[in-house]
């Protein structure tokens, strides 16, 4: 069930370092630490953008919300694009992100307005890196645990914050081996379900090594039409330390019936 089928260049070791230390001589090692660094940061606001392109058709899905990296819980309001005629505005889908699970409200015709749909992310062929129309911010960071190659591009800014830009490729199979328990099975599923387990990325880290922006490029085989669907998923993180209060639905608030395709 898929919701819709940054510059002053300086040598790698010469900038001011993350947290006041010198930059890692190995960008691969630095990016392997991106997820634990986010966990240490506690929480943040998040903004997501997912672009899907296939057969000349391109759609963009946007989301915004908050994430608690310690508890691995987040909440996003995801807005689907207008239909092909430019009409038919959709209600935002409320998504709750949890280890191994995705909860959605306003997802699918026939689901009562007060009910949630729960999906086991390990059962999804993309591990929920694409399905919800947004990549879980912590899962996006955990993909970088599988970084195989990376280069330092230079310094730039993301929303007024000085950051360091790195570009490379991660392997989802490798990432799944060292990911947190909640994302391990999901990343393993994505490694098998995507057209390739290799994920090109661009990531921007601040002086404390925290991800400020990360863009992954995924690809999967379209099960309906021939060809591969190209997906660019961008996650921007800001306002670190913000208060986050995410409460998961009670079992009686979860819809158990069939979801009609819209």
Image: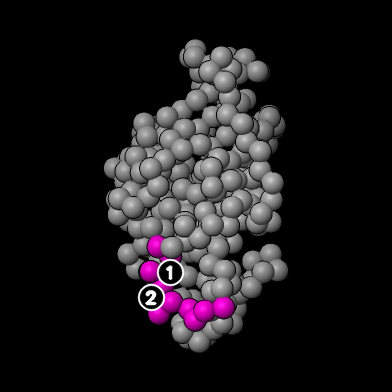
Residue tagged 2: 26
The quadrant of the rendering that contains the C terminus is top right
Q: Residue at x 55, y 40 (%)?
A: 73
| Secondary structure state at the residue bearing disc 1 | helix
Confirm whether the magenta stretch covers residue 128: no
Q: Is residue 96 left or right of residue 144?
A: right
Q: Which image quadrant for residue 145? A: bottom left
Tell me residue 77's x, y (percent). 65, 38
The CA span between labels 1 and 2 is 7 Å
Residue tagged 1: 30
Q: Residues within 10 Å of mark 2 (few under 14, many from 20)?
A: some
Q: Residue at x 59, y 52 (%)?
A: 42
Does any portion of residue 248 appear in the rendered image? yes
Q: Do the residues bearing badges 1 and 2 touch, measured as CB atoms within 8 Å?
A: yes
Tell me residue 149's x, y (percent). 34, 68
Q: Is residue 192 left or right of residue 3?
A: left
Which portion, as a residue range, is magenta? Answer: 20-32
Tell me residue 45's x, y (percent). 65, 50
The quadrant of the rendering that contains the N terminus is top left
Q: Residue at x 52, y 54 (%)?
A: 39
Q: Residue at x 41, y 53 (%)?
A: 143
Confirm whether the magenta stretch covers residue 24: yes
């Amino acid at each position: 069930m898929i919701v819709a089928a940054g510059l002053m260049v300086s040598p790698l070791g010469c900038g001011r370092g993350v947290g006041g230390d010198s930059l890692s001589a190995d960008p691969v090692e630095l990016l392997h630490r991106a997820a634990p660094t986010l966990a240490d940061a506690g929480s943040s606001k998040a903004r997501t953008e997912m672009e899907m392109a296939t057969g000349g058709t391109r759609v963009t899905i946007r989301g915004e919300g908050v994430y608690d990296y310690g508890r691995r819980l987040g909440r996003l309001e995801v807005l689907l694009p207008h239909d092909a005629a430019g009409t038919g505005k959709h209600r935002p889908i409320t998504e709750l992100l949890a280890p191994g699970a995705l909860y959605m409200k306003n997802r699918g015709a026939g689901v009562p307005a007060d009910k949630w749909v729960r999906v086991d992310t390990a059962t999804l062929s993309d591990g929920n890196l694409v399905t919800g129309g947004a990549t879980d911010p912590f899962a996006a960071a955990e993909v970088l645990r599988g970084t195989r190659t990376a280069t330092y591009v230079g310094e730039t800014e993301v929303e007024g914050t000085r950051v360091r830009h790195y570009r490379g490729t991660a392997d989802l199979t490798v990432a799944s081996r060292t990911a947190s328990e909640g994302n391990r099975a999901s990343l393993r599923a994505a490694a098998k379900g995507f057209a390739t387990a290799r994920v090109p990325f661009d990531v921007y880290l601040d002086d404390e090594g925290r991800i400020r922006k990360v863009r992954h490029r995924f690809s999967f085989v379209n099960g309906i039409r021939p060809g591969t669907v190209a997906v660019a998923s961008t996650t921007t993180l800001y306002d670190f330390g913000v208060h986050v209060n995410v409460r998961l639905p009670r079992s009686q608030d979860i819809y158990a019936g069939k979801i009609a395709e819209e």
